[in-house]
Image (cartoon, helix red, strand yellow):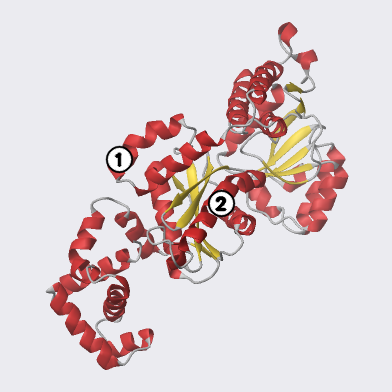
């Protein structure tokens, strides 16, 4: 049952007993009367009832009834007591979301060995095998996880035990037996080819960089090539952006003599380590690439995992940050929200960058506040960047710290409704310095900051410019 993407194991035995059927339970009091071997799916209302000691009681009743699994369809906290009861009672405690009817049908098909279910499992397993890098142990683990079976590797030979072949159609066993046979042959071919060399990985990394830095139209043109190279660009993506704490020292444009070239090389080393380390974390497809002075790590999954998925991504980011941090370089990590597709990938990359700009902490997540998110999406479009540049170009042309200093003053002044005193307090400047620079900004931009429309346009442009 663990092979279903809809089900996440929370507690209980690693390998649950064979199930005989699935039952929908609307009230916790109905658990005790269910037939042995059942997978009990609690409705949302029943799952919300199963909190604290009530979950303990439900697990005891499920064990007494001979149930093999209890599925929670609403977010419920599982404490140590419940985990121990699930383990002791042999009841797999699972979590699921999505449409309840579809979930019950999917579990029923999985139990019955339905042909459609076997085909879905085979497709997942085939994709997992091709992404396992040619290593037999990883191939066996990936194929087993997708099929819901234990797969053993002996060199390039893969085996698994039959699945209910006594009840399957014809002499070939169940539909799942047949699907497993096909996947095992594919696994043997993948293992015989040996570990993937570095070229395809390097090609994916280069293409990922192009997808992130190219114009929107160019990125769309690159999409077919990305799919052909195995980049899951149509999935849901969370982007982890890793940067040195002192980014100026890693600039590839001016690598020497301040050690920047050496640190940039360390980022390249981190990139090569990133995917290997990320694959050990499991649960998602991982890809990495260098983009300017940052290492971009993309965590892709077929479905939107919601807030729980974002929390898991942040935990993965913390572990990954420790594993790929090269000696001598202090890295920080920004984590985006989850977004779908190619454009979503590009927006997530921008969000991760914004997260780092917003906080000095070593691990920061993108703020979901409405205005910044709307601006992020707007600024991700090709049309927005020229508009922002046109408004602020005279300041941006100053370059470096001077441009940043004036933009900070303009934004603070506009954010505080044209109050030099409050802007000065935020920026730790004298109010006369703020007033003097505001007059300079008006001259540079040929702007009238008393005009509400010009003021609003510049305020939005200042916020959007921070995403650059």
State how far apart marks 2 and 1 are (Cα). Answer: 28 Å
| Residue at image location 38% in from the left, 35% down from the top | 223
In this rendering, position of residue 314 left or right of residue 252:
right
- Quarter holding the C terminus? bottom left
Q: Is residue 79 above or below residue 198?
A: below
Note whether 93 is above or below 406 in the view shown. Answer: above
Q: Residue, x 32% and y 88% (percent of image)?
A: 424
Q: Looking at the picture, how far across and down is residue 64, in whole percent? A: 87, 41
Q: Is residue 272 left or right of residue 426?
A: right
Q: What residue is rendered at 63% in x and 48% in y? A: 277
> Image height check: is 362 above or below 303?
below
Outermost residue on the top side: it is 171
Q: Please state if 205 lies on the left or on the right of 195 as rendered.
A: left
Residue 451 visible (yes or no):
no
Q: Nearer the viewer, residue 392 or 71?
A: 392
Within the image, what quadrant is residue 125 found in?
A: top right
Q: Residue at x 55, y 39 (%)?
A: 99
| Mark carried by residue 238 | none
Residue 302 rendering spot, x and y as whole percentages:
52, 39
Name the image quarter holding the N terminus.
Answer: top right
Residue 201 seen in the figure: yes
Q: Secondary structure at mark 1?
A: helix
Q: Which residue is mark 2?
A: 269
Q: Which mark is residue 218?
A: 1
The answer to whether residue 343 is left or right of residue 282 is left
Query: In x, y percent, where is residue 458?
Result: 22, 70
Q: Nearer the viewer, residue 177 or 47?
A: 177
Q: How many marks?
A: 2
Where does the image place residue 241, in percent across and percent down from the top left?
49, 56
């Amino acid at each position: 049952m663990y092979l279903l993407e809809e089900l996440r194991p929370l507690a209980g035995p690693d390998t649950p007993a064979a199930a005989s059927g699935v039952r929908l339970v609307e009230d916790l009091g109905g658990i005790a009367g269910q037939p042995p071997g059942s997978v009990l799916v609690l409705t949302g209302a029943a799952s919300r009832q199963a909190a604290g000691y009530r979950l303990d009681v439900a697990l005891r009743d499920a064990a007494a009834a001979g149930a093999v699994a209890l599925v929670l369809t609403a977010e419920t906290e599982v404490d140590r007591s419940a985990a121990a009861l699930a383990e002791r009672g042999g009841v797999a405690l699972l979590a699921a979301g999505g449409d309840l009817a579809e979930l019950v049908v999917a579990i029923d098909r999985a139990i019955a060995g339905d042909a459609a279910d076997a085909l879905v499992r085979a497709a997942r397993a085939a994709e997992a095998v091709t992404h396992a890098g040619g290593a037999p142990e990883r191939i066996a683990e990936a194929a087993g996880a997708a099929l819901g079976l234990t797969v053993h590797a002996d060199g390039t030979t893969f085996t698994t035990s039959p699945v209910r072949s006594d009840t399957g159609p014809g002499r070939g066993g169940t539909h799942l037996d047949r699907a497993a046979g096909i996947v095992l042959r594919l696994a043997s071919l993948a293992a015989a080819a040996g570990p993937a060399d570095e070229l395809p990985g390097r090609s994916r990394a280069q293409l990922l960089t192009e997808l992130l830095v190219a114009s929107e139209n160019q990125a769309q043109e690159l999409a077919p090539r990305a799919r052909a190279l195995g980049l899951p660009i149509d999935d849901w993506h969370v982007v982890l952006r890793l940067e040195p704490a002192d980014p100026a020292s890693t600039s590839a444009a001016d690598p020497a003599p301040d050690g920047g070239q050496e640190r940039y090389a360390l980022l390249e080393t981190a990139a090569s380590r990133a995917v290997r380390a990320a694959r050990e974390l499991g649960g998602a497809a991982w890809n990495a690439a260098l983009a300017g002075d940052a290492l971009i790590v993309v965590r892709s999954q077929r479905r939107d995992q919601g807030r729980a998925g974002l929390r898991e991504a942040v935990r993965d980011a913390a572990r990954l940050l420790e594993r790929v941090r090269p000696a001598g370089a202090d890295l920080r990590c920004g984590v985006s929200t989850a977004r779908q597709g190619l454009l979503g990938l590009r927006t997530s990359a921008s969000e991760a960058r914004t997260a780092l700009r917003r906080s000095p902490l070593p691990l920061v997540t993108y703020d979901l506040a409405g205005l910044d998110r709307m601006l992020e999406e707007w600024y991700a479009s090709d049309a927005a960047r020229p508009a922002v540049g046109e408004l602020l170009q005279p300041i941006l042309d100053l370059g470096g710290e001077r441009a940043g200093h004036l933009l900070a003053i303009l934004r603070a002044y506009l954010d505080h409704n044209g109050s030099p005193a409050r802007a000065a307090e935020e920026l730790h400047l004298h109010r006369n310095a703020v007033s003097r620079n505001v007059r300079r900004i008006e001259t540079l931009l040929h702007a009238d900051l008393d005009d509400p429309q010009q003021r609003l346009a510049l305020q939005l442009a200042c916020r959007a410019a921070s995403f650059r």
